[in-house]
Image (cartoon, rainbow, N blue to C red):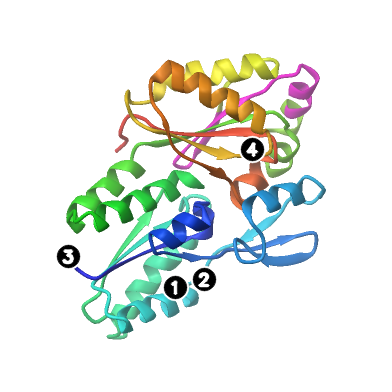
Amino acid sequence: MSKYKIIADSGCDISVEDEKRWGIDIMPFDVTIGGETIRERVDISGEEFLRRIAEEEEIPKTSQITQFRFEEKFEECVNEGFEDVIVILINGAGSATYSNAVNAAAQLKEDGKSGNTKFHIFDSRTYSIGYGYPAVEAAKKLEAGQSMDIVLAYLEDWFASCELYLMLFNLRHAKKSGRIKAAAAVMGELMNIKPIVEMIDDHTKVVGKPRGEKKAVDALVEYAMTRAIPHTPFLIGRSLATELEDEFIEKYKAKSGCEPGMVHSVGSVVGANAGTSFIGLFIKGARRD
């Protein structure tokens, strides 16, 4: 087994315990909120972030990780003698972070500084624990002795099939971020609609409009069952709607016969777009080209 390292950005939203246990190197995003710039995970936790944006009128802004920062990180990896470096990053459709990493690796090679290190850079095509979970699973597989080729194939397959569904209980942030048109959001609030928003690759659309929280939970369970590959784990990105999340988890477990693969608070990226009251569901669907 080669000497390897796994790197992810802080949008992966894995727990600090998983980060330390599996030796995943997290590069933090800078987030501006209320006129203050803070480092995600370093200065504020995911749950603390959600509680703060609940009190702010302004939509938080997340800065991309620059090519220069990646060059510094990658050169460290080369100097430390890593043979394989897996880099798992936020959806490239919504951030230049992925392309900055690709450019950094290319620049390092052009400058003759990449040595024998191979950089495997993944555009996760998703958000939050949708790429945090497979980062942890990749670390587990490598520690168990699986080959680098098998682990890279696992990651490629997951990112080609992961689907994210947001059940929004409050439309304020979705309206401000542009995920839902302002007029539709106002009408939705008046009619007590709790939209199911599908986010796959670079596409976002509303796929359900149930009314009321209880009906919404049931509707998300039923819809997700039509999309998920049977007997595959589901993931929950937690907001502050913990009782509804717990209700969903129990109902989905009963319906699917599957246990959640990961449950953890989301951070700035999902929180800025979805707000503080939602169910964030990640499933493994049919593989896309």
User: How many neighbours does mark 2 have within 10 angstroms: few (below 14), some (14-19), or many (20 or more)?
Assistant: some
Q: Is residue 196 magenta?
A: yes
Query: Which residue does the numbered mark 1 point to in the structure image?
Result: 70
Region in magenta:
185-205
Instruction: Give the quadrant of residue 74.
Output: bottom left
- For the point 59% across and 20% down, the residue is 217
Query: Which residue does the numbered mark 3 point to in the structure image?
Result: 1
Query: Which residue does the numbered mark 2 point to in the structure image?
Result: 66
In the picture shown, does residue 238 fall above or below 29? above
Q: Nearer the viewer, mark 3 or mark 2?
A: 3
Q: Nearer the viewer, mark 1 or mark 4?
A: 1
- For the point 55% across and 65% down, the residue is 28
Nearest to N terminus: mark 4 or mark 3 = 3
Amino acid identity at mark 2: Thr
Query: Which residue does the numbered mark 4 point to in the structure image?
Result: 179
Nearest to N terminus: mark 3 or mark 1 = 3
Q: Where residue 272 sits in the image (x, y, percent)?
A: 67, 47
Is disc 3 placed on a helix, strand or loop? Answer: loop
In the picture shown, does residue 279 fall above or below 70? above
